[in-house]
Image (tube, rainbow, N blue to C red):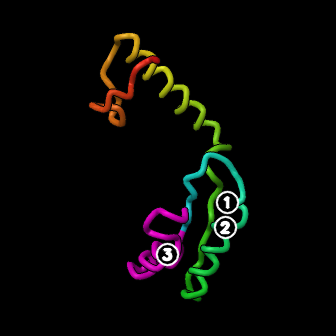
Amino acid sequence: MELAAPSIGDAFDACVAEGATTVVIAPYFLWPGNHWDRDVPALAADAAGRHRNVRYLVTAPLGPHPLLMDIVEDRIRYCLGHVAGGGSECELCAGTGRCRLR
């Protein structure tokens, strides 16, 4: 959040510049915490303060969603299958040599 570009403020401004009248901020967090509870809402409110006629929403993080565990299980199955000799490396590990059982 602190190091990634664009910042919440810059992204908010860009959305408004493109004509948005509602901005949805969807934190890519695995679970609720201080960033979701305090930091992101404060940054969103600060950005919204520059655009008085624009509404905004900060959504819930990903973690509580029940389908997230399905994604995690799918990744585990795929990687275990690959290191057991079945299938190719995933798009993240391709050519890196990282995908091996140690």
Q: How many labels does the image show?
A: 3
The reply to whether the magenta stretch includes residue 19 is: yes
Circles 1, 2 touching at the beta carbon (< 8 Å): yes
Q: What stretch is highlighted in magenta?
A: 1-23
**Residue carrying label 1:** 36
Residue 63: image quadrant is top right
* Residue 85: x %, y % from top left: 35, 11
- Give me the residue at 36% from left, 36% from top: 92
Amino acid type at image mark 3: Phe
Give the SS element for disc 2. helix
Work out which quarter of the rendered image holds the N terminus and state it.
Answer: bottom right
Q: Which mark's residue is nearer the viewer, 3 or 1?
A: 1
Amino acid type at image mark 1: Trp
Residue 89: image quadrant is top left
**Residue carrying label 2:** 39
In the image, which disc is placed on residue 68? none
Structural crowding at the residue carrying mark 3, measured as other residues with C-alpha within 10 Å and reported as few (<14), some (14–19) or many (≥20): many
- Give me the residue at 44% from left, 75% from top: 15
* Residue 77: x %, y % from top left: 48, 20
> Could you tell whether 73 is left or right of 16 in the image?
right
How far apart marks 2 and 3 lie (CA) works out to 15 Å
Q: Nearer the viewer, residue 84 or 77?
A: 84
